[in-house]
Image (tube, grey):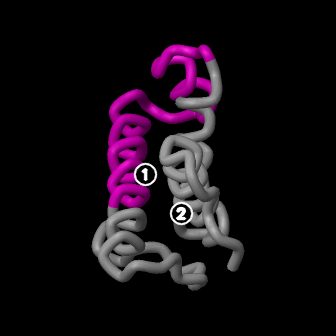
Amino acid sequence: MEELSEGDPVTALRELIGRAVERLDAHPRTRHLHDVLTLTYHSTSTQDAVARKLNLAFSTYRRHLARALDEVRETVWEWEVHGRIRTEQEPNREFS
């Protein structure tokens, strides 16, 4: 697996978070979480508009968003603790 950008910590962190988000898209069980995150943070839409776009009740959307953020946080933490980015595609099982 390729290394993160050297030198600029902001760019390296963006790449790391981006990889954690893309990891959600790689597994069918968490693909919907990837959609929630990308539509929420890569658009100018309100959360209510994103929920409607995904055809979700607002409370369901918020639950999925919280789970997606937890998955990304746990993935980045795991990579930090183990000192490497693992290549497995299986998301964290803790939040199933």
Residue 88: say if magenta: no
Closer to the N terminus: mark 1 or mark 2? 2
Residue visible at 49% across and 50% down in the picture: 13
Secondary structure under the numbered disc 1 in the rendered image: helix
Determine the image quadrant of residue 65: top left
The answer to whether mark 1 and mark 2 are in CB contact below 8 A is yes
Residue at 55 percent across and 17 percent down: it is: 49
Residue depicted at x 36% and y 35%: 62
The part of the image, by quadrant, that contains residue 22 is bottom right
Residue at point 56%, 52% (across, down): 7
Does the rendering let one see residue 32? no
Q: Label 1, on which residue?
A: 68
Q: In the rendered image, which quarter contains the N terminus?
A: bottom right
Q: Magenta span: helix, strand or loop, mainly? A: helix
**What's under tag 2, amino acid-wise?**
Thr
Q: Nearer the viewer, residue 14 or 54?
A: 14
Q: Does the image show residue 94?
A: yes
Q: CA distance from mark 1 to mark 2?
A: 8 Å
Q: Quadrant of residue 25?
A: bottom right
> Where 96 sits versus 63, above or below?
below
Furthest-right residue in this view: 2
- Residue that mark 2 sits on: 30
Q: x, y (%) of residue 82?
A: 36, 82
- Farthest front residue? 7
- Span highlighted in magenta in the image: 44-73
SS for dot 2: loop
Q: Amino acid at mark 1?
A: Ala
- Vertical position of residue 68 compared to residue 77: above or below: above
Q: Quadrant of the C terminus?
A: bottom left
Residue 16 is left or right of residue 65, and the answer is: right
